[in-house]
Amino acid sequence: SGTIKENLKWGNANATDDEIIAACKAAQAYDFILSFPDGFDTYLGQGGVNVSGGQKQRLCIARALLKKPKILILDDSTSAV
């Protein structure tokens, strides 16, 4: 729960807006986020009930990218990208 931006910041609490946007673009989440009336300030329901399964995956990928890991292992999550 919380907003999309708050959810993404779990990956890096100190992430700048530019870093968040870059991660979302890399995860192909940026366009669908902006399609919501409140954009990054859109409230996510408990368990992400107001986004699709694919959108949840893209948000998780963006959050992982914000952590700036040395290695990022992606399995099934990229099969439809």
Image (cartoon, rainbow, N blue to C red):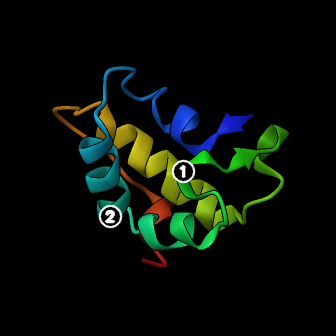
Q: What residue type is labelled 1?
A: Phe
Percent of width and height locating residue 67:
30, 30
Q: Residue at left 80%, top 58%?
A: 50
Where does label 1 land, which residue?
40
The single residue placed furthest to the front in the displayed view is 37
Q: Nearer the viewer, mark 2 or mark 1?
A: 1
Q: Is mark 1 on a helix, strand or loop?
A: helix
Q: Which of marks 2 and 1 is nearer the N terminus?
A: 2
Percent of width and height locating residue 47:
80, 41
Percent of width and height locating residue 27:
37, 61
Q: Residue 25 carries which label?
A: 2
Asked where in the image residue 46 lies, by quadrant, the reply is top right
Q: What element carries label 2?
A: helix
Q: Which amino acid does label 2 sit on?
A: Lys
Taking depth in this image into account, of 46 and 14 the one nearest to the observer is: 14
Taking depth in this image into account, of 35 and 78 the one nearest to the observer is: 35
Taking depth in this image into account, of 41 and 22 the one nearest to the observer is: 41
Taking depth in this image into account, of 59 and 35 the one nearest to the observer is: 35
Q: Residue at left 28%, top 34%?
A: 16
Q: Residue at left 40%, top 49%?
A: 62
